[in-house]
Amino acid sequence: MARDTTNQARTQGRPTLQTIADRLKISRATVSNAYSRPDQLTAELREKIFEVAREIGYAGPNPAARKLRRGRTDTIGVLFTEELTFAFSDPAAVTLLRGVSEVLSSRDLGLLLLPSPPGAEKRASTILDAAVDGFIVYCMPDDDDRYHHLMDRRLPTVMVDEHRTHETAFVGIDDRGGARSVAEHLLALGHRRFGVVTDRLKPDNHAGYADIERQRTATFGVNLERLGGYADALEAAGIPWEPVPVIEDFPISPETGARCAQALLDREEPPTAIICTSDQMALGVLEAARSRGIDVPGTVSVAGFDDIDEAARISPGLTTVRQPLLEKGRAAGRLILDEWDPASPPTVTLPTELIIRESTGPVSI
Amino acid sequence: MARDTTNQARTQGRPTLQTIADRLKISRATVSNAYSRPDQLTAELREKIFEVAREIGYAGPNPAARKLRRGRTDTIGVLFTEELTFAFSDPAAVTLLRGVSEVLSSRDLGLLLLPSPPGAEKRASTILDAAVDGFIVYCMPDDDDRYHHLMDRRLPTVMVDEHRTHETAFVGIDDRGGARSVAEHLLALGHRRFGVVTDRLKPDNHAGYADIERQRTATFGVNLERLGGYADALEAAGIPWEPVPVIEDFPISPETGARCAQALLDREEPPTAIICTSDQMALGVLEAARSRGIDVPGTVSVAGFDDIDEAARISPGLTTVRQPLLEKGRAAGRLILDEWDPASPPTVTLPTELIIRESTGPVSI
DNA sequence: CTGAAAGCGCTTACAG
DNA sequence: CTGAAAGCGCTTACAG
């Protein structure tokens, strides 16, 4: 691809509105109208303009110029604080984006994916250079610097799942309640020895047990809330939370989940129930159990969170907390298109539902 | 989101480079240099400029203006001829995009997703209004009108999988060879009665058996080639291709695959081997067999194409043709960034590999 | 129905 | 090191 430093070189010889106007000896404005306001000129003239355009290879008004002049870009930026590739690898993220894209595409708006990998310098430019009319932000932890760059832009912003403040719109679910419900389900089955598998609690790339202090100071609000929900349920049942082993690792994937499961299963007193803050991790726990010949749910029960498609298809079917991923994406898409009072941005909280399948059962022994 | 018709209203009161220049009684150019060419002014002045910017809430040069002036957008458009949501629902598409995004994000380029659903009017504007430096196009059939709009733009373009011409760069795989290999595998297992499940052969929303005429005139090149590969193998083994039932349906999904399987299994002489042009469809065939209590591979063997992650995780593991989806995406990303002679655009063809798992076995009876 | 004028916000050689 | 000038390509009231 040509990457010239001057636009002269790049656009040299490219026709513009003026090229066509000159040919037909009419004004640039009329040519513009042919494309943008057909009612402003006769059909014949319009057709004549298009004919010349075809002839000289003019593909229509330059999009960048149009956006500048109009003051809007008809594009929404979707910011990921993980590698952009995450948008295409995590099934929950994928489904969320599907919902967003449904709404945007119905309004003929573009969706600009903004990578913002951990790397200080790049961070600002990703946000500051994006030609967008608004932002949808996914997975931004509470103490993230990029938040300030976003606010500097003074564009409508919808945060999804994380980083709930009074300054932006927000879409999320009842993470705490959902987590509580799955823990209560396992308690009802008689389980008393739990193990927990979670992805990032903070952006510091910690992998290993997360002590109670770390849990309490987690900056990824979703996992903070989910752990809180498990703790609520256990303590209500008289089981102290602090001794429960919580393993943290990243990235979210079955492989990571399997790694966490190995550690839990290697313990002197392995848990009879393993709860995961995501289905992707739970898939890995199932795999680890299978590879060790451990029966699920006979020996150990496994539960997840999200209800991704594969949770129903895998064998044994995964007990999990369903969250309306698609609807969450749609809600984010709708919010970014709505007008709202910047002084009190709207908040949408969607419900969760406990889905019981075959991966959980009564405690044995 | 505010959707004003005039940019005055939208940008009213927004600071620009000039606002800062006026405050400091320096020229606009110097303020611009502070952001874009730090070596052109003293560090102190630069800091003073940033200080004023912070004070008045200036987030840096307007991205749209910058793009217009520079003549490049630092954005690559990815065009889907299916609903944009497809980018986030088909696992093969998702993995491909992951590869593309890896490359683009490493170069700090944005990825603009361009929906282009079947709806004549919208088609042109999606392509003509995209402020991008190049296009990556996925799933565009051979006779698509949008192709001409793309060519009108005269931007570097990479076609993926479909629509191979001499006018654009191309990335694909050896579809025919891969298809042949899986058919040969089944023939070696003794199968003689085949059934085939495919997604779209043409964009006309046909669902049902695809006769030989339709197969031969398919405009989706990938499926054309894959069917051709199956036919090659069967005919080489002395099995006439024309009587082999080929069922076409859409969209690509396990549900669709299950629907196709029902029809094949309902036949008077059901096939002992069902080959699918995609894993997503094969997943559905497995589901349909399971729901009918038909043993796989005891009664019927099932094979797919792609080797998506789930193919290895499902039970029984799916025999399939692996294609390097991630690598394909990376190749497309690299090609769009390369400079090449427009007169002879490059072509990349990646290899496939037969992956034998548990879903295929010797023919019984 | 058509066109002259103003201006969107910026970057870049170039002169000093 | 700094600034005046030119111009990227377009849209939109407004006057005729």
Image (cartoon, coloured by chain):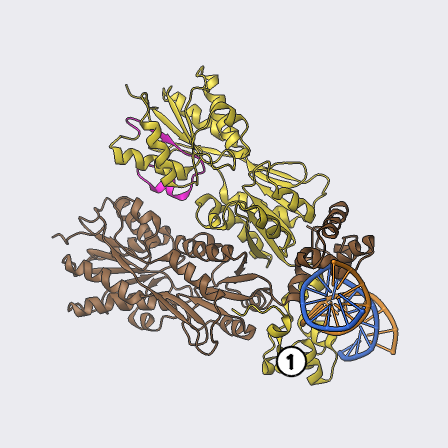
Chain colours: A brown, B yellow, C orange, D blue
Left/right placement of residue B154 relative to residue A280 reads right
For mark 1, does the 10 Å Cα neighbourhood hold few (<14), some (14 to 19), or many (20 or more) residues?
few
Q: Position of residue A207 (x, y in %)?
A: 37, 61
Q: Position of residue B177 (x, y in %)?
A: 51, 28
Evaluate whether residue B62 shows in this view: yes
Q: Quadrant of the C terminus of chain B?
A: top left
Q: Looking at the picture, which amino acid does disc 1 mark?
A: Glu
Figure check: B57 above or below A131 = below
Q: Position of residue A299 (x, y in %)?
A: 18, 50
Front-lying residue, B237 or B86: B86
Figure check: A323 above or below A1 = below
Residue A352 in which image quadrant: bottom left
Residue of label 1: B47
Residue A350 in which image quadrant: bottom left
Front-lying residue, B359 or B244: B244
Q: Within the magenta stretch, is there residue A269?
A: no
Query: Which residues make up the magenta segment?
Result: B297-318
